[in-house]
Image (cartoon, rainbow, N blue to C red):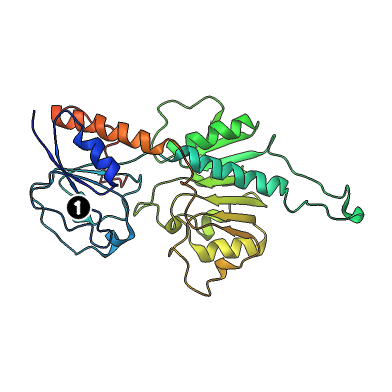
């Protein structure tokens, strides 16, 4: 069995997990988050995260021995092209989908119920609050990958109608999902809508004035994908005009927003600091399982899971 050289940028415990693999890999821990591209020349495998410092990587680096890159993140837009090109790239697709889906459900319930806003402190307030409901409301999903599926599962448990569109063809439409031909159709039929689509050159800025004009009046828009999918000025115009009632944003572009950006204080925007993926108890174990299974497959020359199509960007 080949003894691979693996660079670990996750944490020391993960390095120990890799070292225990039957192939007895030489594991090199490299935790310099400011310069994650400073790899040893004989590195064959890189296991990394989407550190912001990757955005400042040199225009080119030469690592002729590097054959495979495994990322913890699902998105790959943070990484330089030279790291991806000519190599097998596998990602962390679906690892944090349960946490992100919980965030979405929390946002839906916050808008419909607003329990903290209904806090009663006097007799004058007693019995004056009218709550909304998720039952019977329509939830639109722009993108139906692991996150979309996790959201749909939970939304259906609340008896919501779920509409969804995806870039690729539906191999099989899941039970309880109404397939839509386009994001326009999704927004037109939704009370709440979730952006859960990968960021690619084709999807950058796709949520613009033209698309939002098709939104059902009063739509609540949630973005848990990438900020650059949305033209922020168009979003603010739709909120100000009343086309959208609220926006829950866990992502922005740029991220974080610059000082003085109106997105910080807009009364119809709930902004969180790109942390919807946090809080899970099992994503680390799932990542270990994914990485070790892929390592077995890579060493055996067999198909690997969650291989990124670089031409499509995900």
Residue occupying image coordinates x 34% and y 40%: 92
Q: Nearer the viewer, residue 201 or 122?
A: 122
| Location of residue 281 (image quadrant) | top left
34 relative to 298 in the view: left or right: right
Q: Secondary structure at mark 1?
A: helix
Residue occupying image coordinates x 61% and y 44%: 106
Residue occupying image coordinates x 82% and y 52%: 120
In the picture as drawn, the residue positioned furthest to the right comes out as 123
Horizontal and vertical percent position of residue 228: 42, 58
| Location of residue 290 (image quadrant) | top left
* Tally of marks: 1
Horizontal and vertical percent position of residue 235: 55, 61
Horizontal and vertical percent position of residue 163: 56, 36
Residue count near mark 1 (Cα–Cα under 10 Å), binned few <14, some 14–19, many ≥20: many
Residue occupying image coordinates x 45% and y 57%: 227
Question: Looking at the figure, which quarter contains the N terminus?
Answer: top left
Horizontal and vertical percent position of residue 287: 33, 37
101 shown above or below 219: above
Question: Looking at the figure, which quarter contains the C terminus?
Answer: top left
299 shown above or below 141: above
According to the picture, the residue beneath numbered tag 1 turns out to be 83
């Amino acid at each position: 069995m080949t003894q691979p050289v693996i660079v670990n940028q996750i944490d020391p415990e993960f390095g120990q997990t890799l070292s225990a693999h039957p192939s007895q890999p030489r594991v090199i821990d490299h935790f310099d988050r400011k310069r994650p591209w400073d790899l040893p020349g004989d590195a064959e495998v890189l296991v990394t995260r989407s550190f912001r410092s990757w955005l400042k990587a040199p225009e080119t680096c030469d690592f002729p021995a590097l054959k495979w890159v495994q990322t913890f993140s699902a998105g790959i837009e943070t990484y330089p092209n030279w790291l991806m090109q000519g190599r097998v790239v596998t990602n962390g697709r679906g690892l944090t989908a349960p946490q992100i889906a919980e965030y979405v459900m929390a946002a839906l319930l916050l808008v419909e119920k607003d329990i903290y806003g209904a806090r009663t402190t006097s007799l004058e307030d007693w019995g004056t609050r009218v709550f909304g409901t998720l039952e019977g409301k329509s939830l639109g999903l722009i993108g139906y990958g692991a996150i979309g599926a996790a959201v749909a599962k939970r939304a259906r448990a609340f008896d919501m109608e779920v509409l969804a569109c995806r870039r690729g063809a539906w191999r099989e439409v899941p039970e309880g999902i109404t397939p839509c031909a386009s994001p326009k159709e999704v927004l037109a039929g939704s009370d709440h809508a979730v952006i859960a689509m990968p960021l690619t050159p084709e999807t950058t800025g796709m949520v613009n004035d033209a698309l939002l004009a098709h939104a059902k009046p009063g739509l609540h828009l949630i973005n848990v994908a990438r900020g650059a999918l949305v033209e922020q000025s168009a979003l603010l115009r739709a909120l100000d005009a009343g086309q959208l009632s609220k926006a829950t944003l866990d992502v922005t572009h740029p991220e974080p927003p610059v000082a003085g950006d109106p997105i910080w204080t807009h009364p119809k925007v709930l902004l969180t600091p790109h942390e919807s993926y946090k809080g899970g108890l099992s994503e680390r174990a799932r990542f270990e399982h994914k990485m070790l299974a892929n390592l077995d497959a890579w060493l055996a020359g067999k198909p690997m899971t969650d291989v990124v199509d670089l031409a499509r960007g995900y």
